[in-house]
Image (cartoon, rainbow, N blue to C red):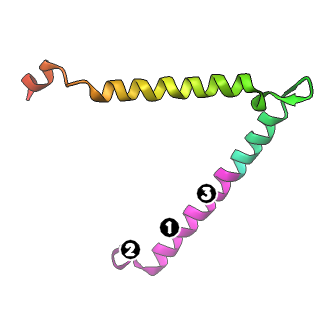
């Protein structure tokens, strides 16, 4: 890859990736701090067991749905088109 784009362009690409990752991670930390500042009864809402239960339930439903869709055969009309 480096022989095609050259050393100068390779350094520029890695610098762009590093700066981009730094900006994204800084933004993530700002959002995380803002989300954790929401409190009810002196405790962060995102640390409550109810929020965690709802989050895990949602992730589980998504995962099961993806697995169920992945295991189904393709519709018959897909094969007829090709």
Residue underneath mark 2 = 5
For residue 37, what is the image quadrant?
top right
Q: Is residue 11 magenta?
A: yes
Q: Which mark is residue 13?
A: 1
Label 3 element class: helix
Q: Which residue is mark 3?
A: 21
Residue 41 appears left or right of 78: right
Specify the quadrant that holds the N terminus: bottom left
Q: Residue at x 56, y 63 (%)?
A: 16
Q: Name the main secondary structure of what is drawn in magenta.
A: helix
The answer to which of marks 3 and 1 sits earlier in the sequence is: 1
Q: Position of residue 18 (x, y in %)?
A: 60, 64
Q: Secondary structure at mark 1?
A: helix
Q: Residue at image x 74%, y 40%?
A: 31
Residue interval drawn in magenta: 1-25
Residue 47, label in figure: none
Give how far across and how far down residue 41 sits, in percent.
91, 23
Residue sitting nearer the eye, 9 or 66: 66
Q: Is residue 5 shown above or below 27?
A: below
- Of labels 2 and 3, earlier in sequence is 2
Report the residue at 41% width, 23% height from top: 65
Q: Relative to 75, is 55 on the left or the right?
A: right
Q: Residue at x 77, y 27 (%)?
A: 48
Q: Quadrant of residue 44?
A: top right
Please, is residue 71 above or below residue 77 in the view? below
- Total numbered circles: 3
């Amino acid at each position: 890859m480096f022989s095609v784009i050259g050393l100068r362009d390779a350094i520029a690409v890695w610098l762009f990736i590093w700066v981009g990752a730094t900006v994204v991670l800084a933004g993530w930390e700002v959002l995380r701090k803002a989300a954790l500042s929401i409190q009810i009864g002196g405790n962060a809402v995102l640390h409550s067991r109810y929020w965690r239960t709802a989050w895990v339930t949602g992730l589980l439903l998504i995962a099961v749905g993806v697995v169920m869709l992945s295991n189904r055969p393709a519709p018959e009309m897909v094969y007829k088109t090709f």
